[in-house]
Image (cartoon, rainbow, N blue to C red):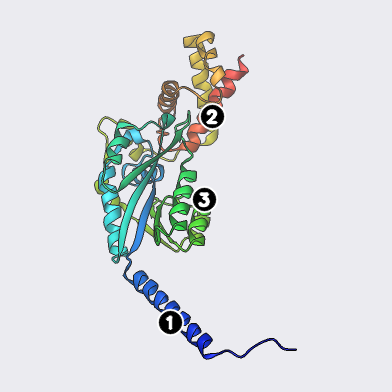
Amino acid sequence: MNDVRPTGPTDLTALAAGIERTNELLTRVLAEVATTPSTHAAFVDAGYVYAAAGRLVAGTEDRKGFELDAEGIIEAFIDKARTIFPDSRLLRVYWYDGARRRIHTQEQQRIAELPDVKVRLGNLNANNQQKGVDSLIRSDLESLARHRAISDAVLIGGDEDLVSAVEAAQGYGARVHLWGIEAPGGRNQAEPLLWEVDSARIFDLEFCKPYVTRRTGAEYLEQAAAEGPAPSREEVRFVGARVAAQWLSERGRDRVAELLPGHPYLPGTVDQELLTAAEALLRHSLRGHADLRRVLRDGFWEHVQAQF
């Protein structure tokens, strides 16, 4: 026996009223969405900006060799975003950099005081390499996208490790735009990163030049412009061993042996002494050649360890 009863007039009235309330709610939601401005944020890998802009304008990635007008280039990034996203408001600029024990340097303090800028610090290891920055970018980018705080993300960096951050943000509906700085004779952004983003833009020498100033007294910068091709890895490794031999004869075994517990790292002052001595022997600057500097240290350590 069928217990289903025909729908009465009262039930139809209630159903129609429910549908009308749902339509009113949807109309209000759509109206609110239509009037809510889009929001964008910029996520800047400061290490990338310093290295790429320094290499492009000053011919070196060594921060000691040039001064970057961080406030100026941040403002330039903000202005560029305004023209690209005219109907969007800026949430803030996130500036990711490294610092010993995550303690702000004076320069980082000045940047942190800029309006609409938040400085986020990773760590610096003994080789002055940033650690933890990529994970900070991923965490912030994913969190803002998940909470619908941004509709567009400007990512200024080049590390392949940022691919997962891009994918996470896109998974929550945000569009990610990769910005970079021109690399003389090559590319300074990972191809997998370029493949994943929604758009890409490169800033050239004319854009960067006003914000980078060569430091006076950095003579190696002028010398580097007149130098020929960089030395080979074998030459650099040999010079590293040669400097180690000189130090053993000049400073004594005890002084050099004090460095062994820190292997494979050298104290900052000692590392600079090694670099200066090697450049004098090579007659070529190694500033900005991170790979050759690693080879130089390897050659140094190989000779030292062979003597003990």
Q: What numbered label is drawn on residue 20?
A: 1
Compare marks 2 and 1 and give the one earlier in the sequence.
Answer: 1
Front residue of this view, candidates 161 and 184: 161
Q: Residues within 10 Å of mark 1 (few under 14, many from 20)?
A: few
At a point 27% along the width and 37% down the height, the residue shown is 110
* Observer able to see residue 194: yes
Q: Quadrant of residue 107?
A: top left
Q: What numbered label is drawn on residue 63?
A: none
Of circles 3 and 1, which is in front? 1
At a point 27% along the width and 34% down the height, the residue shown is 215
Of circles 3 and 2, which is in front? 3
Identify residue type, mark 3.
Answer: Glu
Spot occupied by residue 305 in the image (x, y as percentages of width and height): 60, 19
At a point 55% along the width and 13% down the height, the residue shown is 257
- Mark 2 falls on what kind of element? helix
| Residue 150 to residue 112: above or below | below
Lateral position of residue 73 relative to residue 237, left or right: left
The residue that mark 2 highlights is: 237
The residue that mark 3 highlights is: 160
Spot occupied by residue 103 in the image (x, y as percentages of width and height): 38, 31
Q: Marks 2 and 1, how far apart in space?
A: 79 Å
Compare marks 3 and 1 and give the one earlier in the sequence.
Answer: 1
Front residue of this view, candidates 145 and 297: 145
* Observer able to see residue 181: no
Quarter of the image containing the C terminus? top right
